[in-house]
Structure formats: structure tokens, C-alpha cells
Amino acid sequence: MAGSVLLTACANSGGSSSSSSGASTGVSGDTVTLGAAVSLTGALAREGILTREGYDLCTDVVNAKGLQIGGKKVKLAITYQDDKSAPDTAGQLIDQFNDKGNKLILGPYGSATTEAAAAVVERNGQVMVDSSGADDKIFTKGYKRTFAVLSPASKYLSAIVTAVNDLATPKPKTVAILSADDGFSKTAADGAKTEAGKVGWNVVATNYFPSRATDVSSSLTQIRGLKPDLVLGSVHLEEGIAIIRQSRELGVTPMAFGETVAPPTPDFASTLGPQAEGVLGSSQWTKEGKGKDEWFGTAADYNASFQQKFGREPEYHAAEATAACFAFVEAMTKANSADPNKVLDAVAALDTDSFFGQIKFNQTGLNIYKPMAVIQIQQGQQVAVWPKTDKTSAMRWPVATS
């Protein structure tokens, strides 16, 4: 379209970039356009829409403040396509972006779709900043052009283990882990098992059920007689709701429940009502975080900006999406270019604070430098309980679950 940035590069990762105009910066016209294949329909639509909101807030803030590239002010725009929550579709859309000259890609929602996208990005010589594909295994395949701003999957459930061991009195002695069978959830469950062993807890069971299951009663029945002190769910929203709801029905009553992904999602507490009380959740970000940057300010400032645009407080899905967009903006600013190979080098070298926390990548593209946070549902609201430096409320323990 008129006035948009043309981003072109050789199809292989080692190629140099060029364009008919603005060859030194990768920019022509007055708009830098990022491509994003996001789950707007399908099983991941709720999380995908939250991701899009985070991306949209980024463009608003950056365009209000002004992005300077190549000595001129340019606008930031994002072109969206619906991957329908399907990894194969996500990969096809990344190819389509490439065919249209979109070399800078914001990641889709979820590990499976991100893994599919990363393979295509690598083949095409694009660059992707991943906002929500957390599975560590994505980053064991030698990809050089995908970077994840979020903490890896292995830290999600282990953060709850660490927090409970740090804060709980009395400390739990036994834990049961219930996990969906997708790659992200399995990796998170393995991280919790490892951490539980380190702190001296006995993992009495690790049970798996199909991803997106809404009936987990069989797994709950298997652990009921073991009477674990803590039940941990390595899950997404639907499975997380099912664990809590069906535990009440089946009489599974540990000291507390802790889950990945589900509790920080707004639908969790609104769907479960009083049953959500006391459930712990791992979170990539809270508004109490101490990070700060020149675009979004503090975590509290980001919270206020999101509220002004959307009429509600953000949760971590939105924040991590904005952080991915922020990483591109920082990289383009430092490179003084939107040329994909120059941006690639700048992204790889990032080491900066932000409203989201530290943005820095190891040699595989993982951000191993930013810790997870732990929230708890109290009186229907998410409150930060760990780390202690960022808490807004003491962790309730034990939690009545009958």
C-alpha cells in the first residue's frame, strides 16, 4: 500500500538485503510493517486475541512517541493473519508474509505454532521475535533467527515450587503433577519435577491427559487416594479450569493448587468464581515488576496505558506480546535500520531493561535472564505473591479446598 515500508532480503539466512529505495535502512515510505500470524479463531483464540491486544498497544505507544530510523520519523504497523490455532497454517502464513516482503515477524501464540513458524522463518531468512512460544525444545534445533522475550517453559511450574517452598508454612511434603500432553506442558512438568526434587518434596504422581481436555476426572481419581499436599497443573485455560472444577466434585483437597497459564488468564476467575480462590499461577509479568524503559515506562505505567486503551488491566499474555514488539523497536533503533540482517544482529545483541523485565538472549535465542512471577487468586482478583520484592499480598496457605 502507499507509504508502507518495503522489506526485502535474500531468501537464505546468509544473504544480504536490498531494496529499490532506502537500501541502507530497509525502509521506503513512512511505515515499518511487521507481520504477525495470530490465533484469532480456533482453540487458542482467547490467548491469541490477548496477544494481538499487546501488539496493538505497542504500535499506539511507539507511534505516539515517534520511531526514528535512517534519520527520519516512521510509523510502526502490524499486518495480521489468522493462523486458526493450527501450526501448519501458521507456517504457511509466515511464507506468505515472506512472499510479500515482510521479513520482520512477531510470533504467534503458543509453542506448537511458534515452532512451526520458526522453521519457516529460518528457511526464508526472516527474523522473528517470539512472544509466547515458551517450550525450551524450540531452541534446541539450531535456529539463529528466532528470539523469545519470555522465560522458558521449564521455569513456569518450577517457579510455583520455588515460591511455595519459600513462603509456605507448613511446607508441603508431597506433590502430584497433572499435565496436558503437548510439548510446552510436558516441558513445564519436567521442570517442576526437577525443582521438587531439589527442595526435597516427594512427587507421588505425574499424570498426563490429552491437550485441550475438558474432562480430567480420570487423572484426578488416580491421585485422590494419594492425598498430595499440593497439586500442580501444567496446563492451558480449558484444562486448568477442569482440574479445579472437577477436583471439587471428586473430593481432591490438597493444601493448594498451582497451575501454569490458566490462573493469570481473566477467564479463569470469572468462569470458576469462588472455586478459583487461592489457586496459584505462574506469570511472565505482573504490574508490580521493577523494570522500566523509555517507551512504556514502568510496569505500573504499562498497566495504566493498557487500561486506558482496553478498559481493563492487562495480564501477562498482553505484556509479553508488547515486549516482543518492544524488542523489535529497540533493535531497529540501535541498528538505525529495518534491514532484516541488521535487525537480526541488533536483536541478538540486546541487553536492556524494560517494563517486562530484562530483555537478553542466550546463543540459542532464549531469554534465560528474566525470572517468572507467581500470582494467587484472592477475592476474585490476581495478586502478586512472589518474588517477595514484587508482592502485593501475602500468599494464603494452606487454602481451604473443600
Image: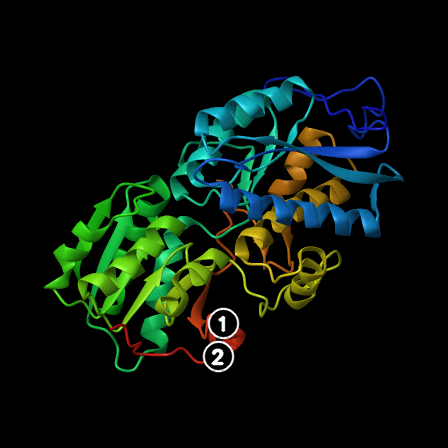
**Label whose residue precedes the other's in the sequence (1 or 2):** 1
> Which secondary structure lies at badge 2?
loop
Question: Which residue is depicted at the point 55% across and 27% down?
Answer: 121
> Which secondary structure lies at badge 1?
strand
On residue 307, the disc is none
Q: As rendered, which of 392 and 354 lies closer to the eye?
A: 392
Determine whether label 1 and label 2 are within 8 Å by CB: yes
Q: Is residue 151 left or right of residue 100?
A: left
Q: Quadrant of residue 19?
A: top right
| Number of other residues with Cα within 10 Å of mark 2, as a class: few under 14, some 14 to 19, many 20 or more | some
- Three-letter amino acid code at the position of disc 1: Val
Residue topped by disc 1: 383
- Three-letter amino acid code at the position of disc 2: Ser
On residue 393, the disc is 2
Q: As rendered, which of 265 and 329 lies closer to the eye?
A: 265
Give the CA distance from mark 1 to mark 2: 6 Å
Q: Is residue 308 left or right of residue 23?
A: left
Residue 307 percent across, percent down from the top left: 67, 61
